[in-house]
Amino acid sequence: QVQLAESGGGAVQSGGSLRLSCAASEYSYSTYCMAWFRQAPGKEREGVAAIERYGSTSYADSVKGRFTISRDSAKNTIYLQMNSLKPEDTAMYYCAADGGQCGSWWERHSVYNYWGQGTQVTVSS
């Protein structure tokens, strides 16, 4: 059973930066595809970014050019560098993992088998 643990959330002002981390309990087929999702109160969970086993990335249009996902397979960890943060980025951020490729369906939260507990990001104007 893969376990995911997020860290790095916090409160920042608009225009600020944060880096989220997600440590997985193992590096295996089950964690080849890893992604970040977020959920604001009253809204559906949405995909933010995903990264494939060998480093290919995908991003939601709303964060392109501002957020960067990366992974350190030696540490079983992925990161989300968030720059130029906006109040609308305020949400609980979740790490997710799934086997195989993330593919073009990476934004569908239902395909991910493993989830972390989340870390809160709050951006004030």
Image: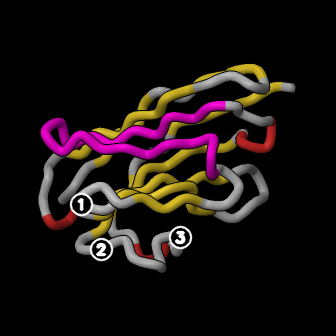
**Camera-side mark, 3 or 1:** 1
- Left/right placement of residue 10 relative to residue 97 reads right
In what element is the residue under mark 1? loop
Q: Judge whether residue 79 is colored magenta.
A: yes
Describe the element under mark 2 as helix, strand or loop.
loop
Side of 5 relative to 18 (left or right): left
- Circle 2 is placed at which residue position? 101
Indicate the position of residue 57 as horizontal and vertical percent values: 42, 58
Residue linked to disc 3: 107
x 17%, y 36%: residue: 75
Labelled pair 3, 1 in contact (Cβ < 8 Å): no
Q: Which amino acid lies under the numbered mark 1 shown in the image of this protein?
A: Arg
Which amino acid, mark 2? Gln
Query: Which residue is at the front of the view, 87 or 115?
Result: 87
Separation (CA) of disc 2 from disc 3:
12 Å
Tell me which segment is drawn in magenta: 64-83
Residue at the location (37% across, 57% down)? 51
The residue at which mark 1 appears reads as: 53
Which badge, 3 or 1, is on the more N-terminal residue? 1
> Above or below — where is 115 with respect to 122?
below
Instruction: Give left or right: position of 82 versus 100.
Output: right
